[in-house]
Image (tube, rainbow, N blue to C red):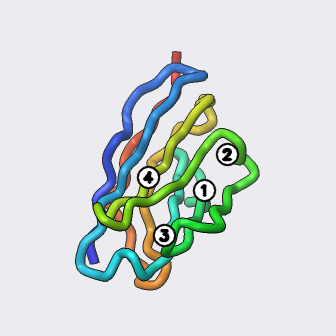
Amino acid sequence: VQLVESGGGLVQPGGSLRLSCVASGFTFSSYAMSWYRQAPGKAREWVAYITSVGGSPNYANSVKDRFTISRDNAKNTVYLQMNSLKPEDTAVYYCYAPRFGSWGQGTQVTVSS
C-alpha cells in the first residue's frame, strides 16, 4: 500500500488549497479513506472520512462547512478541498487508509499572513 499526498503550501488566512492523495497497491475503489492532520506539538487528529463509493462524508467539527472530502476512483485519488483557511489549520496533513492502517508521508499546510 502506498499513499502519496500533494498540494500543500503557504496560504493567507481566508484562502483555499486542495490536497490530493494518490493510492496504489490495493483496490482503491473498495475502501474508505480518511484525512488526518498534525500541528506542531500536538497529537495527530482526524479531519475527514469518505466511504468507498464517495458517500457519507464526515468531518471534524473544527473543519465542518469549510473542508470537503471527495474521491475519484478512476484516478485512485482522494481529495481534501480546504476553504476559508485559518492559522489554526496549519499542520502536516496525512492521507490514511483505515483498512490497512497505512499513512502517506504528509504534506505541509501553512496558513499565515
| Residue wearing tag 3 | 33
Q: Is residue 1 left or right of residue 55?
A: left
SS for callout 1: strand
Q: Earlier in the sequence, mark 1 or mark 2?
A: 1
Q: CA distance from mark 4 to mark 3?
A: 10 Å
Where residue 111 appears, as percent x and y from the top left, is 52, 28
- Label 3 vs label 2: CA separation? 17 Å
The residue tagged 2 is 63
Q: Which mark is residue 38?
A: none
Amino acid at pointer 1: Val
Dot 3: element = strand
Q: Amino acid at mark 2?
A: Val
Q: Is residue 1 above or below residue 41?
A: below
The residue carrying mark 1 is 47
The amino acid type found where label 3 is placed reads: Met
Going from N to C along the chain, the mark reached first, 1 or 3, is 3
Q: Quadrant of residue 26?
A: bottom left
Which SS class for mark 4?
A: strand
Binning the other alpha carbons within 10 Å of mark 1 as few (below 14), some (14 to 19) or many (20 upward) gives: many
